Each structure stands twice: as structure tokens, then as C-alpha cells.
Amino acid sequence: MRQLQLRLARGYELLGEWVKARDTGLEVIQEIERDGGDRRTLAAAQSRTGFVQEELAQYMEAEKNLRSALANAIATLGEHHLQVAGIRLQRVELFTNLGRYDEAQQELNEATGIIKDWGPQGKMMMGTALQQAAVLLIDQNQAAQGLAALQAALPDFGVGHAGSAQVGIAKAYARLGRIPEAIDVVRPALSVVENEFGPGDPWIREIRVELAGLLRLNRQHDQAWAIVYGDPALNFDDLPVQHPFHALLLRERGLLEAEAHHPAQARAQLTESLAIYQSLFGRDAERTREVEQDLKQLPL
């Protein structure tokens, strides 16, 4: 019965029904904890629900479930099981997103050590680890090293990993100021990852907005406006208002309004974006500081 519930939760994920996926997963967790069920199934439910909570920007709840999932997986499978490595990689993604880079690196080291011991069985997971290692470098202003790592590993990735890696390559190009190259890479990569994860995945929507930002930087304003104001995929009705996708979309709209000499509209959008970033990540986060700088550059 519980396995069926977990499959149902996964189905909700694939449909973009994130709240239903979370609530179904939480029901399974509560039932197992109440009835004293199998800890391996509990670990799987906590891992999957933690992923959904991160997608919903519920970071504290996600961290709690992933911490418990790791403990339960280790207790039932041992320190060196591939499922344990998978949960550690989920924690890498979460910590990276929160700017907790030392913790992310520690988890990545642990996961990579496990995956290496599994040989060919760990090949797909190693692709994820390589991508996360590169993203860690890029997010810590080591874009050239991250780019080199992704380009070196690209021939070994499968189709799904290759699409995600290309998104990472585009991000590195953007950090290096190589905007036309970033656009050329991210457009086909977006199609690949959309097929892999579905257009409703919050990450896919963020990539669309990031493409708009690249187009703006490349002076292709009409195309950027068409994305952030006219793309029907860029809705957030299924996500909390306090979500980084919403903040990113508001910021990009604000920057376009500023470049169109609409300071009042720009200030309104950027102020709302700033409030979301502060709420989710705090005043010292890089994303928060960037929007603060955007606001300072607007005419009074």
C-alpha cells in the first residue's frame, strides 16, 4: 500500500502537482513513523518528499527530511550503499542552493567516495556528482574551472545528464561574460531538459527566465520581453509566492522595465523580488545583494 502511495506521489510530481506530491509523501512518512514500519521505505519516502519540499522552496522542511532519510538509509543499508550516496547528493544540491558551500562539498566528497566503489552500477549517479561539483565551482566564482570540468565530462554523460550539463556550461559562460555563447548553448539544452523533466518543473522555468536575462544582456530586448511577459509556461500558480522562481521572474521584469526607462515599474518589481530573496535566503545571500544593487542603480 505504501509503495503504491509513493508511486502516486511520484505521479503528482510528473504532473507538476507539487503540493499533492508533498502531502502524499508526508502521509506515508507519518503512517510509517506511527506504525513502526520498514525504515528503508521510510528513507525512500523522506528522500522523495525532501526533494519535493526543496522544489517548493520549503528548505528547512527539506533539510529535516533529508537528514532523517540519510540516517534511516545508513541504518538499514550501511554507509556505503548507492542509495545513501543518492541522498547525500540531494543534500549537496540543497546546501549549494542555500549557499552553504562547505557542507555541500563535504557531502559531495562522501557521495563520490561511495559511488566510485560501485563501479559501472554507479555511472549515472557519478554523472550527477560531476555536475554538482562543477556547479559548486561556478557558484563560488570559479566559473572557468567549472566550465572545464563540465566540458571534460560531457562525452561520458547520457542524454539527460548532457542536457543538464549544457545548462551548467551556459551558466559558466554567462559568469565569464560570454553571453552569445551562453545563449547558443542554453537554447538547445532547454529543449533537452524539458523533455527530461517536463516544462512545469520549477528548475525548467528558472532556465527560461535566465535565458531572458541573457537575451537582455545581448540587447535582444523584444525576445526577452516576450519570455518574461508572454510565455504561458512562466506561471507560478502551483508554487508558493515565496519561491526563487517568482523572485527571479520579478527581477528580470524589473531590469527590463529599467532599461525601458520605466523606473516606477522597475522599482515595484525589484522591491518585491528583494523581499522574496531576503525571506528565503537572508540579507547576505548573493542573490539578495544583486537585487539590492539593481535598486540602487535606479534613478530616484
Image (cartoon, grey):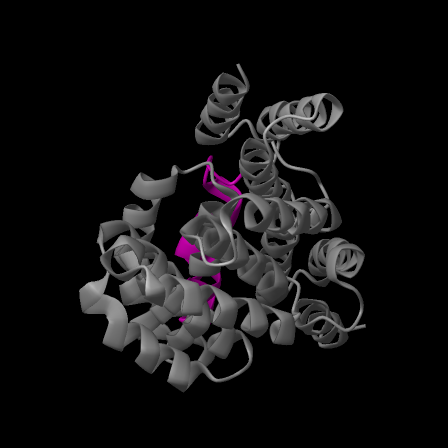
State yes or no: residue 17 in magenta: no
For the residue pair 101 and 217, the one nearer the viewer reads as 101
Can residue 176 be spotted in the picture?
no
For the residue pair 212 and 56, the one nearer the viewer reads as 56
Up/down of 211 relative to 297, above or below = above
| Image quadrant where residue 120 sits | bottom left
The segment highlighted magenta reads: 212-235
| Image quadrant where residue 118 sits | bottom left
User: Residue 221 at x, y = what percent?
Assistant: 44, 61
State yes or no: residue 215 in magenta: yes
For the residue pair 134 and 36, the one nearer the viewer reads as 36
| Residue drawn at x 77%, y 58% as measured from the top left | 271
User: Residue 255 at x, y = what percent?
Assistant: 60, 64
- Which quadrant of the rendered structure holds the C terminus? bottom right
Which secondary structure dominates the residues rendered in magenta? helix
Can residue 37 be spotted in the picture?
yes
User: Residue 248 at x, y = what percent?
Assistant: 60, 56
| Residue drawn at x 56%, y 67% as measured from the top left | 107
| Image quadrant where residue 22 sits | top right
